Amino acid sequence: MKLNRTEVIWDRTTRNELNENWDTIEDEVNGLGENVSVEVLNRLTDRIKDLADTAMVNEALNGDFSEGTEGLFAWAAYSGTSIRGQNGKLIMTGDGANRQVRVRQSNGYGLSEMSYTEGHKLYIQGDFKVLASGSTGVGFEFYGSEVTGTIHSVVQNVPEANKDYKVSDIVELKGGAGKMIIQIKTFFASAPEANGKSTEVDKILVLDLTKIFGAGNEPSNEEMDYLMSYYDYNWFDMAGAGKMALAGFKLSMENRSQDDTELNIINDVQNGNFETANSWLALSGTTISASDNALYLIGTGSNNLVRAYQITDIPYRLGDKIYVRGEFEVDNDECKMAGFYLRSSGVAATNETFFRKTAPRRNELFEMSGIMDVWDGDGAGSISVYLRADYTDSASARDNKLSVRKVIAVNLTEAFGAGNEPTDREEFDKLIRRYPDRFFDYKPKSGKWQIALTNYQVSNLRKPKVPLIAFTIDDGNLTDYITAYPLFNQKGIKGTSYLVNKWVDSNDNRFLNRDMIHEMYENGWDFQCHTANHNHFTDYATDQEIRNEFIINNQSFADLSLPHPEHHAYPFGDYNRRVIDIGLQYRKSLRATGMTSGIGYNEYDRPNYGALNARSIDIGASEISRLTEIKNVIDETVKNNGALILYMHQVKDNPDDQYQAQLSVVTEIIDYALTYINSGKLQSVTHSELFETINNYQI
């Protein structure tokens, strides 16, 4: 086989560097025979990464809307448009003054400083969803600031409401001069038609291909779309050329890698791509149907659970590990949680397993996955896979729909052998995402799996995950200062206290005062928000009442000369979708009071910043089972490179209330964590540090 060293799409400098060692690489490839082993592909991957390390920069600053207040740093709206941030996306809304709803990069930042260079080719890409009908188009429009030149449009015409679109194209700049003016816009027939209509925007990417690859060497739009598929979410802020060079290398090998040999990795779900509803059974309170490769589960109003299930061919066998994955979407705001429920098909067993998302957002597709450990010998039969949405009551479930796509269930023990199973669910997810269409029926194809494996290796260049543990305390009680603070200092553990405005520095001597807070803060203690009045959020009738809880707490922190609070703990663990949406406008993360995703710790690759997992250690000395459970969660956090938040309230020698932790128990938990911390396997952090570590990993 002769590798093509002229058509592979890397820049001239990189190509020259590669040519120095190209003959060696080509010899290795020619010696592979017809079957390319993963080991050799990995070796070639490393070689190519070593040969190229220049950077490609996304010209759009904050294109994933993750920086600044509400994620809107460096973005501005035109007249006729208002903007807000929501869950890492930009929402632009028309006010009826213009038929175009438009935003741009703010003056002095990113795209606004990009020169309009005649003849240069730009690759432009973004994710769009119009949230109401009536739009005639959505996408980009750009031209020169001094001389307009050709007005270029990259648009999805007549988009459907609430449907995700990835809009991309390559445009050659012609006739303009000055700086680039790039508008993100939604078009309507008239200004009144645009009034109140919103569009969701995310993952804006603008690459000057001529600058990156050299004139005449720019890739096509199809090739760029292919290359971008090798990045998580098809987006980057800055990327090493080695990664892009590897993708070009994969293009040159694509034809010989499409081996149809089937691997012994079996998806035991029948009809997981839902060509029909066959093989799936609805339970009471649910009707099911299938279309467009999705299964639709609709509540009838006779049960608060909307469910369908399938008994797979995976035997319920002690010690086995079962991986499941699917893509879910709800069409309503009433759903409390949605995802998977796994159990024995025969005799009931105690290790019924849930993998669910709490308070899923309406019309937002989300991935759920997990690895079930079969540890209870009482079960029998096979593994049953349930697709499920939970509602508060039967009436809330009526006519509401859960959509499910691409369901996979793999017996990892059968596929890889006992003791050799992949145990990191997040890493296996990455591999599946790189398999074509993120789904295989029965067995994956060898060639496609090799491409997924190689691509996975390259994508895994980000900084390693570090297991984290955060000890946190709610309410700002006096015992934070007189008991927890000296204990944590003695043990070398970091702490976070969540303060309630009405109790801080009050006449109630059960809580912290200003002097205590200042001493603790000066010695590294972290203080965050627990609202102004410690009320149930869901009892508030208006959005403004919820907002006031954050606004007043902000002022309290300013009065105490503390930094602006960036994180929050829900009083009573009480929240819903409305509370999450408002809370994330004021805080970077919101902490819940339980397992919100089916596991006890938080995951680096899919943190739920609207409802972070947290485990209570308000435990008395007699509650041995709960103490053992917490130790097991610490073990799992270290094993799976997770981020664990533990919370408590008052710390006392002899608790007399359910919201109190026994000092001896807290000490035992800290000492258990220290066995990992002192050996370098676990890191003690504050809530703020936990968030920053996870967020930096994602960036």
Image (tube, rainbow, N blue to C red):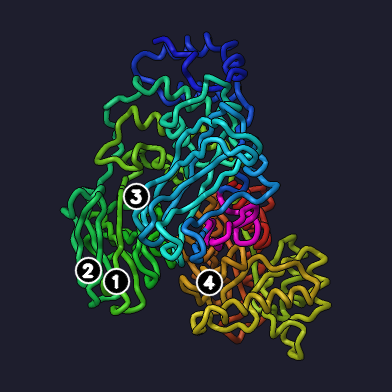
The vertical placement of 559 against 295, above or below, is: below
Q: Is residue 73 magenta?
A: yes
Q: Work out how far the residue at label 4 is from the one at label 1, CA to CA, in angstroms.
A: 22 Å
Q: Secondary structure at mark 1?
A: strand
Badge nearest the viewer, 4 or 1: 1
Label 4 is placed on what type of residue?
Thr
**What x and y, as percent, mark residue 673?**
63, 59
* Residue name at image x 79 percent, y 68 percent: 521
Marks 4 and 1, the one that precedes in the sequence:
1
Q: Which residue bears the numbered disc 3?
A: 322
Q: How many marks?
A: 4
Q: Which residue bears the numbered disc 4?
A: 593
Marks 1 and 3, the one that precedes in the sequence:
1
**Crowd rating for badge 3 (residues with CA inside 10 Å; few <14, some 14–19, many 20+):** many
The vertical placement of 214 against 297, above or below, is: above
* Residue name at image x 83 percent, y 71 percent: 519
**What x and y, as percent, mark residue 112?**
65, 44
Q: Work out how far the residue at label 3 is from the one at label 2, CA to CA, in angstroms.
A: 26 Å
Image position of 569 (left or right of 264):
right
Q: Which residue bears the numbered disc 1?
A: 305
Q: Work out how far the residue at label 4 is from the one at label 3, CA to CA, in angstroms.
A: 27 Å
Q: Read off the magenta span.
A: 64-90
Asked if labels 2 and 1 touch by Cβ distance under 8 angstroms, the answer is yes
Q: Work out how far the residue at label 1 is from the one at label 2, CA to CA, in angstroms.
A: 8 Å
**Residue 621 in view (yes/no):** no
**What x and y, as percent, mark residue 446?**
32, 29
Q: Which residue bears the numbered disc 2?
A: 286
